[in-house]
Image: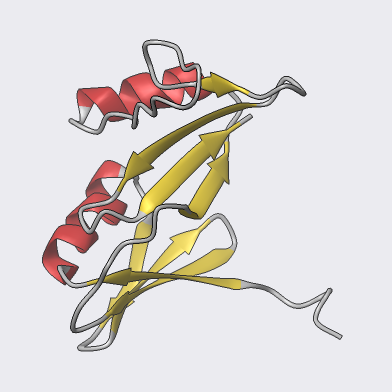
Amino acid sequence: MLADKKIKAFVPTVMPDKARLFYRDILGLKLLSEDDYALEFAANGILLRVIIVPELTPQAFTVLGWDVDDISSVIKSLNKKGIFCEQYNFLPQDSLGIWTAPGGAKVAWFKDPDGNVLSLST
């Protein structure tokens, strides 16, 4: 029923001004529109709607992620913009914050200004 339909992604924010700068200027997503309810970004064919909420308790798990070709390069680019990956004491991660899963996938996590956990993976 929905397998052939485009998906929209939603991420909450209580700080729309900081979210706009983060998603547009740091991550490089194109801002399509904004109003009192949400910011909408183009994300490679997916619509990312950053919804404005009155209060937020960020979840401890990943809410949004990207598949990337070169995870180290992307992380180094984020580092230059002041964004650093989370280091978790329960996972073996390298100095950039990359964890190599048993199957060989590489994953790293970082947070947006609201504390939402975002991920990169290869």
Q: Residue at x 35, y 26 (%)?
A: 87
Image quarter hosting the N terminus: bottom right
Q: At which x and y percent is residue 54?
A: 18, 84
Q: Nearer the viewer, residue 76 or 93?
A: 93
Q: Nearer the viewer, residue 30 or 94?
A: 94
Q: At which x and y percent is residue 35?
A: 23, 86
Image quarter hosting the C terminus: top right
**In the displayed image of the protein, which residue is found farthest to the top?**
95
Give the tally of numbered discs. Answer: 0
**Going by the image, does 96 lie left or right of 9?**
left
Q: At which x and y percent is residue 77?
A: 33, 24
Which quarter of the picture shows residue 85? top left
**In the displayed image of the protein, which residue is found farthest to the right?**
1
In the image, residue 20 above or below residue 1: above
Q: Residue at x 38, y 60 (%)?
A: 59
Which quarter of the picture shows residue 102? top right
Q: Nearer the viewer, residue 16 or 24?
A: 16
User: How are the residues colored?
Assistant: secondary structure
Q: Residue at x 18, y 72 (%)?
A: 14
**In the displayed image of the protein, which residue is found farthest to the front?**
90
**Going by the image, does 7 lie left or right of 40?**
right
In the image, residue 60 above or below residue 104: below
In the image, residue 86 above or below residue 20: above
Q: At which x and y percent is residue 55?
A: 20, 78
